[in-house]
Image: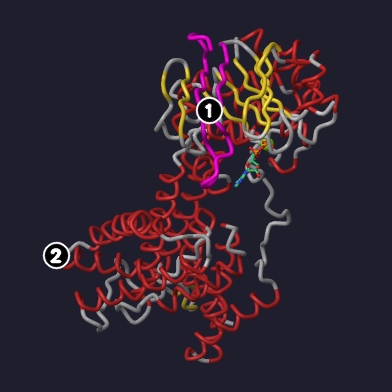
Amino acid sequence: MSADALLAVHGLVAGYGAAPVLHAIDLSVPPGAIVAVVGANGAGKTTLLRTLSGMLRPAAGRIVLDGEDLRGVPVEQLVRRGLAHVPEGRGVVGELTVDENLRLGGLWRRDRADAARALDEVYQLFEPLARRRRHLGHQLSGGERQMLALGRALVGRPRLLLLDEPSLGLAPLVVAQIMALLRRLRDSTGLTVLLVEQNVRSALSVADQGVVMALGRVVAAAPAARLRDDDDLRHAYLGF
Amino acid sequence: MDRFVFLTLDGLSRGSVYAASALALVLIWRAARIVNFAQGAMAVAAAYVAHSVTSATGSYWLGFLAAVVAGLLLGALVDVAVMRLVDHRSPLNPVIVALGLVLLIQAVLGMVYGNEYRPAETPFRRTALSVGGVAVLSPFDLFVFATIAVVVVGLAWIFTRTAVGLRMRAAAFAPEVSRLLGVNVGGMLTLGWALASGVGALAAMLVVPTELGLHPHAMDLVFVSAFTAAVVGGLDSPPGAVVGGLLVGLLLSYVSGYVGSDLTPLAVLALLLAVLLVRPAGLFAPVAARQV
Ligand SMILES: Nc1ncnc2c1ncn2[C@@H]1O[C@H](COP(=O)(O)OP(=O)(O)O)[C@@H](O)[C@H]1O
Ligand SMILES: [Mg+2]
């Protein structure tokens, strides 16, 4: 656990009722890294992200973002601290247009000029969105929705991006494009990414570090390449 | 023919008030999934505030302003102090609480002001002007039209053109995602209640003088008409509420003009029943189902 991590999680316990889903999770995300959290369905990956972004209150443990403890910080303040969470299922607002969804991502920002610049950059990054500005969210294809959700997060110029299963329901080619994009964003803007995936192969192919979760615990944490090549681990927890 | 023209214009004038009240109901339905059955009683309370202010200052317009401000504040209060505390898991709970609120507000108004009708002032004459010998609209009717037009256009502008309007819509459609994007969802909900209640108060100011006068129950039938208008429009659709309001106003005017004014309450209920039975989603239900 390095002291200069952008995100450091210590002994995190959280869940939905009396019985915790997460059991003492430790995690560290260095600045500028892509960290993939992989694990089977029900391992607790979504619960982890929801706890990090304040939607679930931890029963114990600490979440430290860039040296600041996030305990008691309301959800709607986290985006102002540089944390963006693209939830599972993407959270595109179907009743709003593409443009409105994107603008929503920058409404909290004081620097209106830069928010407008960020919006333009997102339209340049995602050509299909620029062509569908006036379309409603629910009129988009799965891939376009993922672009919209990602783009909306980027309008806020986050330091840490939490992504929950971006590959869900997308064609392999689209998944590959999104993973490549994450890599490019990291290289060009220094964006830090915590990526949660069941799609272990693509997640580990893009990530620097891998974390394996099973039944609410971290069972392995290592450079992504090492996890890819560790046959025993793959067989035991990842099923391929 | 002259009579038909008169009834049509009169119906549209009344209907515009129903449209504003229905719009207020739709605002709260969209934001909180609550049909605010207390809206009529809240609006009457605001109209009594206007009555007090006008009596004290002698100025109709100060009273008018006070009613709108009182409506805004009462809406915010009802959200923060009442509806926010209600368990929304059963949709019946907020309905019961709203009905309780009606009883409470009407009882308090009765105690403070008495249960008699008080004449309500109008800023303009209510005698119809005639154009080419045909009685058409009164100056007050024109005032009603203009005010409602400003309200409808103003609300449309707020919701579709401003940042706070975008926040309010997002908070209503996707509260969780909105919070993740930094939107103060609770604040937007309170603002929605305030706006809706302010519009309701305005509608009361415009309709009460055209009926029997100010009374704790003065808005009861107007509320039923507004609710019918909102249901006709589909509850989820602001343009639907406006069209629904005008339709209900026309229907009531024709029934009262050609059949008898005693039958107007029955006509409203019959329309409400018919819409609920034949097209419960309203005449303007959006084609696409809700998806996120
Ligand atoms: N809203 C919820 N209420 C109660 N239990 C839940 C809820 N969401 C998830 N769980 C439980 O928490 C565990 C972890 O779920 P989740 O975090 O969604 O896993 P993953 O994202 O890795 O598939 C599962 O056992 C699941 O049944
Ligand atoms: Mg999940």
Q: Residue A226 at what x, y percent from top left?
A: 75, 11
Residue nearest the viewer, comparing B235 with B130: B235
Residue B144 x %, y %? 41, 64
Q: Residue B241's image quarter?
A: bottom right
Query: Residue shown at 53%/59% (left/top)?
Result: B33
Taking the image as shown, residue B187 lies to the left or right of residue A155, namely: left
Q: Give above or below for B285 relative to A89.
A: below
Q: Work out how far the residue at label 2 is from the one at label 1, CA to CA, in angstroms.
A: 48 Å
- Percent across and percent down for residue B196 are 43, 57
Q: Please, which residue is most extreme toward the left here? A: B56
Label for residue B56? Answer: 2
Between B241 and B101, the one lying in front of the other is B101
Where is residue A45 drawn, in percent x and y?
Answer: 64, 32
* Residue type (three-letter) at the residue carrying disc 1: Gly
Which disc is residue A106 wearing?
1
Relative to A74, residue B57 above or below? below
Left or right: residue A232 versus residue A188 is: right
Q: Which residues are magenta?
A: A1-30
